[in-house]
Image (spheres, grey):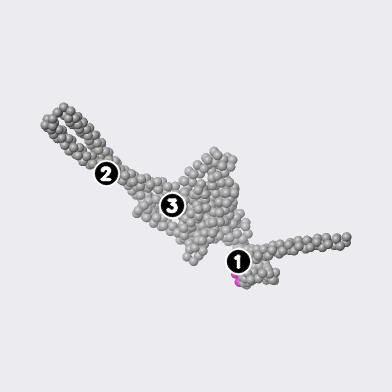
Amino acid sequence: MSNFSSDEDIIELKEKLQHSQLAFRDLALKSRREAAILKRLISRLIAASRVHGDTQLNERLSQIHRDLDTQDNVSRLIPQLALVERMVNRHNQAIEKSTDALECQFLQSGETLKCLPGLPAQLKRDLRTLLTSPAAQQRGSTEKIIGLLQLYERALKLLSLPSNGLSARDLLNIDRINQLCSQLQHLITELDFDGEVGDRLLDIRSRLLLSPDAQSLLELTLESVQLILDGTRNERKASQTFLAQVNEDLSALQRHNGRSIDSTQSLASQRGALTDELAASVDAMQMHLQQDTSIETLRPNLSQVSVNLAAIVARNKELEAREQQLLEQLQHADQKLEALYQQTMDYRRRLGDQERKLLLDPLTKVYNRAALDDRLEHEFRCWHRYNTPFCLAMIDIDHFKNVNDQYGHLVGDKVLKVVARTIHQCLRDTDFIARFGGEEFVVLLPDANEETRHAILDNIRETVAKLPFKFKDDRLTVTVSVGASVFRGTDTPVDVLERADTALYNAKHNGRNKLFWS
């Protein structure tokens, strides 16, 4: 009995041992997988954590990165990791001190700029807004530093003006001139004239980028108005010429068709008379065949019938010639009608292109504000009637002014076009994009549930951030901030636009390259 119990214990121990071996093997596999994942994570963190200005720490990180690729036992790297940890702590302490110094310098520079005499009231208001904005409360925020530098740049430009006693009104006038330049540039961009007028308007737009004075701006404005009048006059003359030519061609075709109808009626009448004469000749021939008893008496009668038939044949050939001539005339008229139709269709296509261009932003080739207003009203009515999900998002290119200032307006225009095309490619066929103004775009997502609209807008943000912009030898990363909202309750389009704009403001003041909802 004891032997039997002993055998059962041995069997049970063997089963436990096998189970423990299997569990140990699974644990070892899991441990190796986790170690591999940990190695990859550490390697990627090291690759992304290059410390500016600390060569020794970067060399240590590079050495650990190389060792991770060659060693299987991560535990051997623990001494190196401990050393790097101490170096990182020292570096963080140095960054803390530097951040504190930067915060003090930011406040001191803001107060210094605030105390500068002769600054316009608008710049001072912008400075107060910057110093009291939520971004200014964020410790170490680069956005507020950039904002302060931009204000210093504006102040420097104003203070660098000739010191001939410019008053506050003079500074205000300078600001108004800059605004008028911007508005005139936008107007010229919206126009669509071909030829010399279009080329001269583009030249004026380039000259406006050079910040002309009041007199030059007035001259450019008058020249633009004259060119717009010339372009409109040329378009009117071209339309009048086309319509006159169409009217002349139609009148000629009408006269030709009238003559063709008269000729056709005459031919039909003559053809009927010819048919009657032919029938009479046949009847006469049959009568003579029945009445005449001898060939001698029949011959003269048949001869007369033969003469009549010959005359009928000759007249029939003449009618055939006239019919052939009429057919050729009708074919010529048909060709003229076809040419007129093609000319009319070409003009119609041109008018259609001009109509579409009126609804397209000429730079980015996406829809403009006018098209947005129409589409938003349509989608709003559909949402109100069917109560399907409807989302509106505002998208703004981050730090776009820096791109213009650093690389020029031509590069800025290229960035706008590429970003607009990228956003459009991320949308569904039923979605809509329009340029709202400057570097802002509005996207409409009708019939999009929560998962779909989140996926689309996140995809837009991530795709833009991956665009490989390169100008000369500089690589430029462009990001967008997105503010979105959905229609609900008794909302109007204005309500949702305001909420989306608020969400966009929050996205830009919380690190940018973010998607915020409101």
Tell which residue pokes out farthest to the front in this image: 294
Residues at discs 1 and 2 in contact (Cβ within 8 Å): no
Q: What secondary structure is found at the residue carrying circle 3?
A: loop
Q: Which residue is mark 1?
A: 47
Whether residue 148 is visible, yes or no, is: no
**Residue positioned 11% across, 31% down in the render:** 296
Q: State the predominant SS element of the stretch in magenta.
A: loop
Q: What secondary structure is found at the residue carrying circle 1?
A: helix
Q: CA distance from mark 3 to mark 2?
A: 43 Å
Q: Nearer the viewer, mark 3 or mark 1?
A: 1
Q: Is residue 348 above or below residue 56?
A: above
Q: Which residue is mark 3?
A: 362
Say what amino acid the circle numbered 1 marks: Ala
Which one is nearer the viewer's eye here, 494 or 58?
58
Q: Is residue 339 magenta?
A: no
Q: Which residue is mark 2?
A: 332
Residue 262 screen position, x and y as percent: 23, 35
Q: Is residue 181 above or below residue 277?
A: below
Say what amino acid the circle numbered 2 marks: His
Say what amino acid the circle numbered 3 marks: Pro
Residue 314 screen position, x and y as percent: 17, 38
Q: Earlier in the sequence, mark 1 or mark 2?
A: 1
